[in-house]
């Protein structure tokens, strides 16, 4: 009887431990920032951002996305007026720019620039948006990443209808991506642009612009000093 009781107790203890282990791992993926994602969330981030952004997302950003309650909403990636309809991005062969949205109470808008090759000049580039008939709800996040680094830029410039960020491309590494996350009220139109410096330039020169639909990518209207520095890559557009 005593042996039987001990055997039952051991089985119960093992079952409890096994159950706790299963319950403890209710996530599909965990990154180095200790952000835990379900499989559904993991796939959602791949579509809204890019496959690999899960590795660098912060707990704060994940919490913001969770608060917006958008993980079960549909994501839309739209084409630019500058290219063939139904294309979801614009490319100049060296790099590709796309814009996506997902809406609930507000709309989360993500623009992503992917370098398809390795840039020869790594100076101050500029990325941002021009928006009409909508309102920016929070401070945007700009993440600059490569195969061996990840950083956030806060060198921003803003107005009532535009927001831009200057940043220096990583000095080393491949697979360079610049990702901007915005929160807008529903309605209106967003134009997004990425402008690459063809020559070495300064942070001051990179901010010599106003926001205008007549500017580069329908976002950045550079002054005479800076206009010739940037490559005039077309922008992308999305309706909220």
Image (cartoon, rainbow, N blue to C red):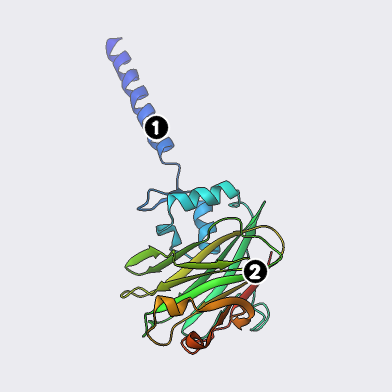
Residue 84: quarter of image: bottom right
Residue located at (41% from left, 75% from top): 203
Counting residues from the N terminus, which is met first, the one under dot 1 or under dot 2?
1
Q: Secondary structure at mark 1?
A: helix
> Is residue 57 shown above or below 149?
above
Q: Single out the residue that lies furthest toward the left.
A: 3
Looking at the rendered structure, the secondary structure element under dot 2 is strand
Q: Nearer the viewer, residue 62 or 10?
A: 62
Who is closer to the viewer here, 186 or 95?
A: 186
> With respect to residue 177, does 183 lie above or below?
above
Q: Which residue is mark 2?
A: 131
Answer whether residue 75 is visible to the viewer in this image: no
Q: Is residue 67 left or right of residue 86?
A: left
Residue 209 appears at what percent x and percent y? 54, 78
Q: Residue 210 in the image: x percent, y percent?
A: 57, 76
The image quarter in which residue 154 lies = bottom left
Please name the residue shown 53% across and 76% down the image: 97
10 Å crowding of disc 1: few (<14), some (14-19), many (20+): few
């Amino acid at each position: 009887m005593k042996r039987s009781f001990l055997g039952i107790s051991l089985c119960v203890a093992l079952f409890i431990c096994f159950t706790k282990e299963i319950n403890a791992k209710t996530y599909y993926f965990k990154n180095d920032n200790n952000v835990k994602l379900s499989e559904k969330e993991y796939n959602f981030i791949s579509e809204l951002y890019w496959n690999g952004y899960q590795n660098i997302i912060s707990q704060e950003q994940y919490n913001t996305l969770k608060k917006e309650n958008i993980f079960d909403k549909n994501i839309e990636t739209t084409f630019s007026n500058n290219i063939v309809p139904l294309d979801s991005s614009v490319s100049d062969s060296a790099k590709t720019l796309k814009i996506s949205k997902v809406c609930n109470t507000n709309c989360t808008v993500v623009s992503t620039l992917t370098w398809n090759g390795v840039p020869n000049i790594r100076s101050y580039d500029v990325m941002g948006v021009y928006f009409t008939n909508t309102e920016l709800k929070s401070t945007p996040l700009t993440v600059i990443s490569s195969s061996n680094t990840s950083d956030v830029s806060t060198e921003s410039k803003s107005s009532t209808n535009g927001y831009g960020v200057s940043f220096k491309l990583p000095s080393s590494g491949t697979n360079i991506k610049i990702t901007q996350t915005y929160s807008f009220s529903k309605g209106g139109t967003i134009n997004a642009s990425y402008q690459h410096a063809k020559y070495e330039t300064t942070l001051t020169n990179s901010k010599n612009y106003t926001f205008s639909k007549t500017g580069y990518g329908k976002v950045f209207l550079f002054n005479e000093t800076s206009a010739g520095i940037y490559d005039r890559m077309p922008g992308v557009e999305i309706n909220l």
